[in-house]
Image (cartoon, helix red, strand yellow):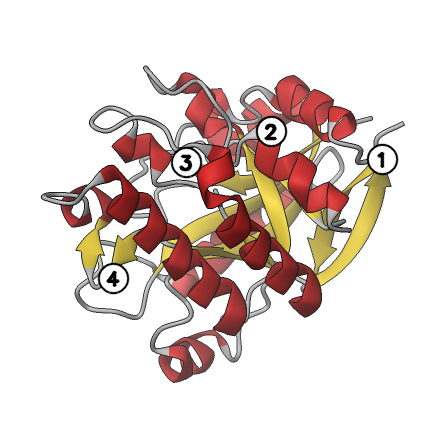
Amino acid sequence: MDFMEYHHHTDNSFDSKAQMKDVCQQAINKGIAEICFTEHFSVNPKAPTYGHMDFKRYFSQIEECRELFGSQLIIKAGIELCEPHLMKEDYQEALANLELDFILGSVHNIKEEKLRTFMVNKTKEEIYQDYFEEVYELVSQADIDVIAHLDLIKRYATESVGNYNFDKYKALIEKILLKAIERGIGIEINTSGLSKSGLIETFPSMAVLRLYRALGGEILTIGSDSHQAKTVGFNQEIALKMAKEAGFDKVYVFKKRLPSTLSLN
């Protein structure tokens, strides 16, 4: 099958300098058939993401790239929301008139602290328990299509307290996944963790992916979470192999927030 890239950032995000046109060209070079740009956005003035996103600029770039590359690449407009279960009315107002194809929901901050800061002076158990509880609040309340990097906290915690024991948090993770399935929200295989020293694991882990499938989960997207043009589609082959091994026979793409499937066979 052709590759799909459903988590990528450009300089419309506060932490990227990538140019959208460069990303599109690299995607074409790598045989990617469809890309969805998912720029960081927050309505919370205390979040690092706040104040960077210029939607007029973003959508003008989307349109320009569709004109330039539309015959070679399907280009979708997405967003990655920080803690969209909080300040919900503000998010609703900010996004009301935007032609978005896809919305990722993330937990990057807990109680308005970056995850790395939030972890300070906490035990390993507190770190993971508090994080997964926040993800449960996210999936219970937010208007999103897919949970981004479901177990992201391990990116920061592994270097100090180690990765989490899946069995220890299985009940809470299962609660998250069942709520996602109930609300028609998917998860992603995010390959960015494969490049992190000491981690070398996707978000989420294979154990979470297998559990999601066993519970009846179907909506699955794949993304690199890349912030550079050169790493667009990073380790897609690994993600697709994982999806098949976990029992998935299709992955999802979105248009105007409506999902459709692509066969993995």
Q: Which residue is mark 2?
A: 206
**Disc 4 versus disc 2: nearer the observer:** 2
Secondary structure at badge 4 equals: loop
Q: Which residue is tagged 3? A: 19
The vertical placement of 107 against 188, above or below, is: below
The quarter of the displayed image where residue 135 is located: bottom left
Report the residue at 27% width, 33% height from top.
Answer: 157
Q: Nearer the viewer, mark 3 or mark 4?
A: 4
Q: Residues within 10 Å of mark 1 (few under 14, many from 20)?
A: some
Q: Amino acid at mark 3?
A: Gln
Residue at the spot of label 1: 249
Comparing 78 with 87, the one in front is 87
Q: Residue at x 72, y 21 (%)?
A: 241
Q: Is residue 225 left or right of residue 124?
A: right
State the count of labels.
4
- Which mark is nearer the camera, 4 or 1? 1
Q: Counting other residues with Cα less than 10 Å from the Cα at mark 4, is it few (<14), some (14-19), or many (20 or more)?
A: some
Q: Position of residue 228 (x, y in %)?
A: 40, 28
C-alpha span from label 4 to label 2: 33 Å
Helix, strand or loop at disc 1? loop
Label 2 and label 1: CA atoms lie apart by 16 Å
Q: Amino acid under label 1?
A: Asp
**Could you tell me how far apart the alpha carbons at marks 1 and 3 are, in whole angstroms?**
33 Å
Which mark is nearer the camera, 1 or 3? 1
Badge 3 crowding class, 10 Å Cα cut-off, few under 14, some 14 to 19, many 20 or more, is: some
| Mark before the other along the chain sequence, 3 or 4 | 3
Q: Looking at this view, is 177 or 231 the one in front?
A: 177
Image location of residue 186, percent across then percent down:
65, 53
Query: 54 and 88: which one is in front?
Result: 88
Question: Which residue is labeled 4 in the image?
Answer: 50
Q: Quadrant of residue 51?
A: bottom left
Distance in Å between CA atoms under marks 3 and 4: 20 Å
